[in-house]
Amino acid sequence: MAKRFGKIMRYLQIKRQLFRLPGLAVLLLLAIIYGGSLQQLLQHSRFSQWFDLLQSEYLQQVIFFSFYQAGLSAVFSLFFGILVARSLFYLDFFAKPFLLKIFSLTYVLPALVAIFGIVGIYGFNGWINQFLRLFGQQLPDIYGLSGILIAHLFFNIPLAAKVLYQRLQQLPASQFKLAAQLNLRHWRFFRWVEMPFLRPTCFNLFGLIFLLCFTSFTIVLTLGGGPKYTTLEVAIYQAITFDFDIETAALLAILQFLFCFTLFSINNRFARYQQSETSPQARCLPNLNRYQRCYHYFILITATLFIVSPLLETLFAGLNARHLWQQLLHPALWQAIVFSLLLAPTAALLCLLLTIALLLTTRHLYWLGKQRSSQWMLNIGTIILAIPTLVLATGLFLFLAEMESSTILLFILVALCNALVAMPFALQLLTAPFYSNMLNFQRLCLSLNLRGWQRWKIVERSTLIRPLRSAFALAMAISLGDFTAIALFGNNGFTSLPLLLYRQLGHYQSDAAAVTAMVLLLFYFFIFLFTEQNRSNDYT
């Protein structure tokens, strides 16, 4: 009897620990992928060359420009983001929801699509230069630091503006009343009320934007214009594809990993967001005079033109391309469409599987009071922010160099890299609803013995289906436009729309590139409309 009782207790103890298996399986998979990639980099790098490499003027120039362009981009993005966020906060107009949706769209837009539109606006034959030539003037060359900054601002101003706008909505109404009593207006109100309230968010945004621009690959590769404007990621790509210098590429990848891991750790260490108990509706905005309203409308109109004009240029260029129907029916375009439409949902589904498996474990740990373990596992899930995609892809590329690779294997590796890129964003969308369900319904599910499919169908489906749809659409959009992994693994038999667009731009096939960019942009509009339709259905 005692033996039987002991077996039953051991069985129950093992069963209670089963919730750890999904998360541990994800951590093991991440450890194999990242550990194997870093092991390949270390294996192919000769540390005897470190001193010579660090002493080279080329590497010093690359490191300096990597930090320099990231710093400038972060400062300008934050400055203009504050201006746009304040104008959104103080003005109420019918197009505000649509403008905020456009800001969300630009964040996941493929970099090559934005670059195509930016070149069409600010390039040598762009709209602005055609107008300026009427007066004998011309913009500086788009290929170089100016083009890199414009492209980074295109992506990061909407990000900063939306985050800061949401933060301003939490500004307590008592602050406005107190400022009115003290006669704090205009600049003084911004200095003594708004800026202290926004400062923690600004510091976090600066770190995030700096890291995003420091690891920028597609923008610098396309708009860099030469060795003078090269970052570490581009130098890694050039060492592999142009020089086939594996040892230098491995050393540069390790250096990039060290920089990014340090920046990621610093950003996480000082990331602190203020909390406010005031709801967004509890606001008491001051009345704006005519000059203030004109100023805020000018800021919003300028920002809208800056964001929307490259998108319109991409659409118009595609519709006005020569031999439009021949370009649309070209086999290379359809091959890229087929691979892209297979890659995007595969990567999105893989991203959701990894994210859900990790959250099933972390939320159970949180419910058991093990908050530190829960947070530690979540941080592991966002490790792709500390190890750039190109560093991971470089390690996998070195691994494949030792074996024969088929199209199926390349497809799986690219889908896996894209899934890991989207995983931090899926975690951000799904963590709160998953944790909320655990805290609100766990005791009920235990009392009714609801598990597995029954628990999902009866309890969790109604609250999780909407964020799961949003996470799937976001992961699909990120994978559809990702260029980093496919740039290393792609070939003539395995391509995607971003890779095809890059090749067409490199061969000066402007009409074909216009059609490809338009098709890619239309896919993103369809994904955007799908997510918005789902949101409206959820509300009704």
Image: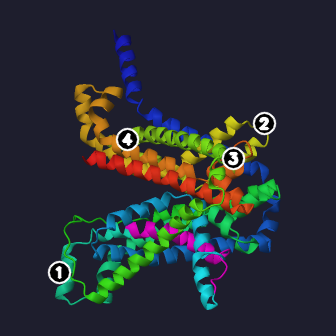
Q: Which residue is mark 2?
A: 404
- Residue 501 found in image quarter: bottom right
* Pointers 3 and 1 in contact (C-beta within 8 Å): no
Q: Is residue 528 left or right of residue 246?
A: left
Is the residue 186 above or below the residue 281 in the image? below
Marks 1 and 2: which is nearer the front?
Answer: 2
Q: How is the image coloured?
A: rainbow
Q: Amino acid at mark 1?
A: Lys
Closer to the chain start, of discs 4 and 3, is: 3
Give the CA distance from mark 2 to mark 3. Answer: 25 Å
Q: Secondary structure at mark 1?
A: helix
Task: Please report the residue visible at 47 percent of the width from the left and 71 percent of the height from the top.
Answer: 157
Q: Position of residue 233 (x, y in %)?
A: 68, 61
Q: For mark 4, what is the residue?
A: 365
Q: Main secondary structure of the magenta part?
A: helix
Magenta highlight on residue 191 = no
Q: Is residue 436 visible?
A: yes
**Which is nearer the N-term, disc 3 or disc 1?**
1
Residue with the mark numbered 1: 177
The tag earlier along the polypeptide, 4 or 2, is: 4
Above or below, comparing residue 455 to residue 178 in the picture: above
Marks 3 and 1, how far apart in space?
63 Å
Taking the image as shown, residue 288 lies to the left or right of residue 121, namely left
**Real-space CA distance between mark 1 and mark 4, rounded to the nearest whole angstrom:** 44 Å
